[in-house]
Amino acid sequence: QVQLVESGGGLVQAGGSLRLSCAASGRTFSSYTMGWFRRAPGKEREFVARIMASGGITYYADSVKGRFTISRDNAKNTVYLQMNSLKPEDTAVYFCAGRYIGGNSYAYWGQGTQVTVSS
């Protein structure tokens, strides 16, 4: 069982930056692919970024590529999402999620943290 707790959300002006953190419990954090997702008001949840267990490979949604950076610190059981050049359309609840190596779905989810970008 893995528990995930996000933090770092808040209100920021367009063009600003925020860094989200997701702290994971458990001793096998390094065996999980970690992802960030978001759900904007009235929209479906969408993929934002993911980072493989070793931390060497990352993937991004086209909408955030070049502005967001996902990283992880396996010694701290934490994954981060650095968000720069934020836009009002980035406003959403952001969730982190964990997928065990070899798994085909994210089995563990955090409770989410609100990010609001004002214009």
Image (spheres, rainbow, N blue to C red):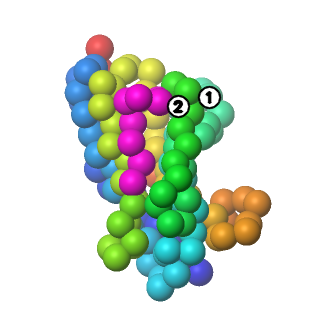
Residue 69 placement (x, y as % from top left): 39, 42
The single residue placed furthest to the front in the displayed view is: 56
Farthest bottom residue in view: 27
Residue 117 seen from this side:
no
Q: Residue at x 48, y 82 (%)?
A: 26
Helix, strand or loop at mark 1: loop
Left or right side of 61 for 76: left
Q: Are marks 1 and 2 in contact (CB under 8 Å)?
A: yes
**Could you tell me the amino acid type at mark 1?**
Lys
Q: CA distance from mark 1 to mark 2?
A: 5 Å
56 within the magenta span: no
Please tell me whether mark 2 sits on a helix, a strand or a loop. Answer: loop
Q: Which mark is residue 40?
A: 2
- Name the residue that disc number 1 marks: 43
**Crowding at label 2, few (<14), some or many (≥20) Cα neighbours within 10 Å?**
some
Residue found 38% across the figure and 20% down from its top:
88
Which one is nearer the viewer's eye here, 70 or 111? 70
Q: Is residue 69 magenta?
A: yes
Q: What residue type is disc 2 on? A: Ala
Q: Camera-side residue: 57 or 63?
A: 57
Quadrant holding the N terminus: bottom right
Magenta residues? 64-71
Q: Is residue 119 above or below residue 51?
A: above
Q: Nearer the viewer, residue 54 or 75?
A: 54
Q: Quadrant of residue 31?
A: bottom right
Tell me residue 113's x, y (percent): 40, 48
